[in-house]
Image (cartoon, helix red, strand yellow):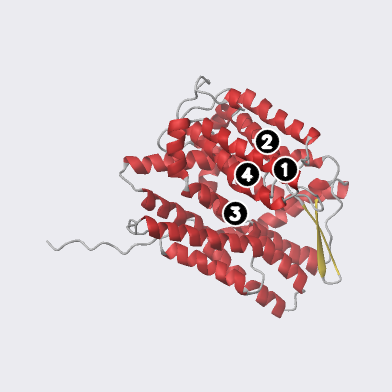
Amino acid sequence: MTAVISRSAVRAAPAPPGRDVFIDVLRLFGMALVVLQHWSMPVLSFADGRISTGNALSAGGAWVVTWISQVMPLVFFAGGAANAISWRGSVRRGGTVPAWLAVRLRRLVWPVLPLAAVWLPLPHLLQALGVPEQPVVTASRLAGQLLWFLAVYLVAVAVTPSMLRLNMVYGWRVPVALTAGAVAVDVARFTTGLEVVGFLNIALVWLAVHQLGFLYADGRLGRPWVMALTGYGLAAALVAFGPYPGSMIGMPGAAVSNMAPPTIALLAVAFGQIGLALALRRWIVALAAWPGVARVIAWAAPRMMTVYLWHMSALAVVTGVVVVGLGVSTPEPGTSAWLSGWPHWLLMLALAMSPLLRCFARFETPPQASPYAGGTARIVVALALAGAGLLVLTAIGFVPGTAPVLGAGMLVAGLALTWSAPRLQPAA
């Protein structure tokens, strides 16, 4: 990897201090593909009060699709570039680290509050209406599992000012060091059998990808086709000769997951994906300039987080009606029935998503607030509370009990700490 990230690399034009349409497209493409994958994967059936779930991508060689469809690396890469641009813009305006973090935390956490407000009472209501417990618990867990991304991304945001300083001094050496750490973690994990060691890679892998976004923002990522071939080539070698499965998402019954926790095989695929995206950058930007595409981007950008947070709720609605209510199981993956029914399945999910989008997109942007003036210690506490709340909801979901209420309470408390009382102007 180091061969294609260097000071002598062919330099792209540095990203302007405003919006970068390439980064916007990557984030939208990433979120759209996440939704499409989550809506297409489930293999569902219902019998004896229990819903059974499978994964369509576990059939045959369908796991190859995940080398493109597992786009969280692109989302973290785009997030790194966006955070670099945002932080540097804040510095030019005289902003401080705590004030910038307060704004970013509010934007991440505010859209989660309506999700919690709906899902905390919803399982109790459904069970009171006679819906079997197991499907309700399954849906309640899945509604919260999506929040893992926000929990990890919040960490990346929190360390952005510090990691940008390291980037200025050491450049490409920072992601290389993070990658070396990820390799050491995987070696320890697979040689000792201590799976818990692997969870250190949640920070190392995703921060390495996030750091590549900084290098892009500096115009320091070059030779994209070499990046793509190197990344995908390393991933193929790791899968062929190492302990890594071919799929870049977790599969039912698999002994090892490349995603939870992330492995260096996923990091290699991330490197390949980023290289491929950079190689296509000129065409992506040109496509985004088309009037029709530009209108779609302008419409989707302020709704992106809402779609991500609520698309599993739409899946729960359609599953509840079709699979649980009507007893219609999804067809066997890859069959003609599955292929012909897939567009209709997606249409039903899109129709279920539409009212959710109209109702909750208004929460995408937090209310206007006075500039944060609470200091560093207070914002650190706010970040810790919000991160802990997201982790609780990720691990447990909205399953009836005290833990989800506690997790939501942490989110509210962390969010409250980011607001400062308006400053009174002295009387004339």
- Foreground mark, 2 or 3? 2
Residue at label 1? 248
Task: Find numbered disc 1 in the image and state the secondary structure of the residue it sits on.
Answer: loop
Q: CA distance from mark 4 to mark 1?
A: 10 Å
Q: Position of residue 2 (x, y in %)?
A: 59, 26
- Structural distance between the alpha carbons of marks 2 and 3: 25 Å
**Which kind of residue does numbered mark 3 sit on?**
Val
Given contact means CB atoms under 8 Å apart, are the residues at marks 1 and 2 in contact?
yes
Q: Is residue 245 left or right of residue 427?
A: right
- First in sequence, mark 4 or 1: give its number: 4
For marks 1 and 2, the one nearer the N-term is 1
Q: Residue furthest front?
A: 192
Disc 2, SS: helix
**Three-letter code, disc 1:** Met
Residue depth check, mark 3 versus mark 1: number of the one nearer the observer? 1
Counting other residues with Cα less than 10 Å from the Cα at mark 3, is it few (<14), some (14-19), or many (20 or more)? many
Q: Identify the disc placed on residue 38.
A: none
Please name which of the two marks, 2 or 4, marks the residue nearer to the observer: 2
Question: Could you tell me the amino acid type at mark 2?
Answer: Val
